[in-house]
Image: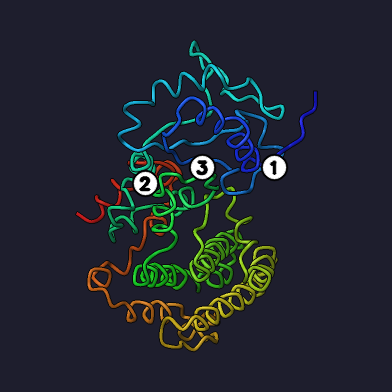
Amino acid sequence: MAREFVPGVELARGYYHDIVRPILEARFPGVEHSAALLGTGSEVLGFDTEMSTDHSWGPRLVLFLDEHDIARHRGEMLERLASELPETYRGWATRFPPVDDAPPSQRVQVVVVAEWFEQNLGFDPLDGVSVFDWVSTPTQLLLAATSGEVFHDGLGTLGLRRRALAWYPHDVWLYVIGCQWRRVWQEEPFVGRTGEVGDDLGSRLVAGRVARDLMRLCFLLERRYPPYAKWFGSAFNRLDCAGMVGPRLSRALTATSWQRREAELGAAAEQVGNLHNRLGITKPVESSLRPFYSRPFLVLDSNRFAEAAFEAIADPEVAALPRNVGAIDQWVDSTDVLSALPRPRRAARWLAE
């Protein structure tokens, strides 16, 4: 029997209101809770399609209880849900398929709010978010915690935590912007240099790296956390500046000569520089291309934007951070490190030692 595709957030929302909440109200009157779809998964980010349903698909959500109620009710609540939840909802299985000899498990997680954030980010935002927390937390984890949808916040603290993570503090923002401009600066002349010696493949590879760094700058300038690689381009296309910057980057990546490649990347860099200046967060930086020393390559000399960002930082703790490192996404490119704790925090501590 064919099942109609329903976006994951819509499916989870209906499942909560139609099925899960009535059970909670009937069986656990007076026990307050919060409920949401957040964490990993394309549906949390709003990029799920019918293809997403080919494995482990179905309605799922996280139920949050306070520490007092979790101790008294979690076991019974899980038992009630296991026995009273239907096998399917809108045609989709309400339990994960069995793994090895384990029985099917339900798609409703019951946890304390603070514990969920500790497990998924390494800290509880209500206790404050330190500079280390900000620079050691991959953007895809910050996005996972602030995307999705809260269906009910009876505890009143889930929304507070998500708002605390909505975006970097101003000076941390300036810091990561500065470090991102440095990344562009470090490789912007190499598109032409590799092409000039006949290394077209190398020129294309460098162009891709610079294009990605410019795209990440666009996310930063529009105050949006970029997701992991699968949805990076899709999320970029939702940015306000994508219609302006995107075509330049696309032409750079499809160009058949290094001269054309360099010209399109340079024009895109100028556009991003203008976006930076329009924010007014640093002193204005002249955004036209200029020669790279006496060589026949035109670059933005992006370090000028980096230095302007660093100079605008007021917080001494942030100002003391190394300018050649940045947040963890800016110096680590391993999926295994960036996708789950505790690796990103361990890596950041290692670098700080």
Quadrant (top left/top right/bottom left/bottom right) for the N terminus: top right
Marks 1, 3: nearer the viewer: 3
Sequence-first tag of 2 and 1: 1
Cα separation between marks 1 and 3? 20 Å
**Mark 1 highlights which residue?**
49
Report the front residue among 226 and 303: 226
Kindly identify the amino acid type of the residue bearing the numbered disc 1.
Thr
Kindly state the secondary structure of the residue where label 2 is placed.
helix
Residue extending furthest right?
1
Q: Is residue 335 above or below residue 128?
A: above
Q: Which mark is residue 121?
A: 2
The local crowd at label 1, few if under 14, some if 14 to 19, many if 20 or more residues have their Cα within 10 Å, is: few
Q: Residue at x 52, y 51 (%)?
A: 147
Marks 3, 2: nearer the viewer: 3
Write down the quadrant of residue 6 in the picture.
top right
Kindly identify the amino acid type of the residue bearing the numbered disc 3.
Ala
User: Where does residue 351 sit, x and y in percent of width and height?
Assistant: 26, 54
Cα separation between marks 2 and 1? 27 Å
- Whether pointer 2 and pointer 1 mark residues with C-beta atoms closer than 8 Å, the reply is no
Q: Which mark is residue 337?
A: none
Sequence-first tag of 1 and 3: 3
Q: Residue at x 45, y 54 (%)?
A: 139
Q: How many numbered tags mark residues here?
A: 3
Cα separation between marks 3 and 2? 17 Å
Q: Is residue 14 above or below residue 206?
A: above
User: Where does residue 228 sit, x and y in percent of width and height?
Assistant: 52, 50
**Mark 3 highlights which residue?**
36
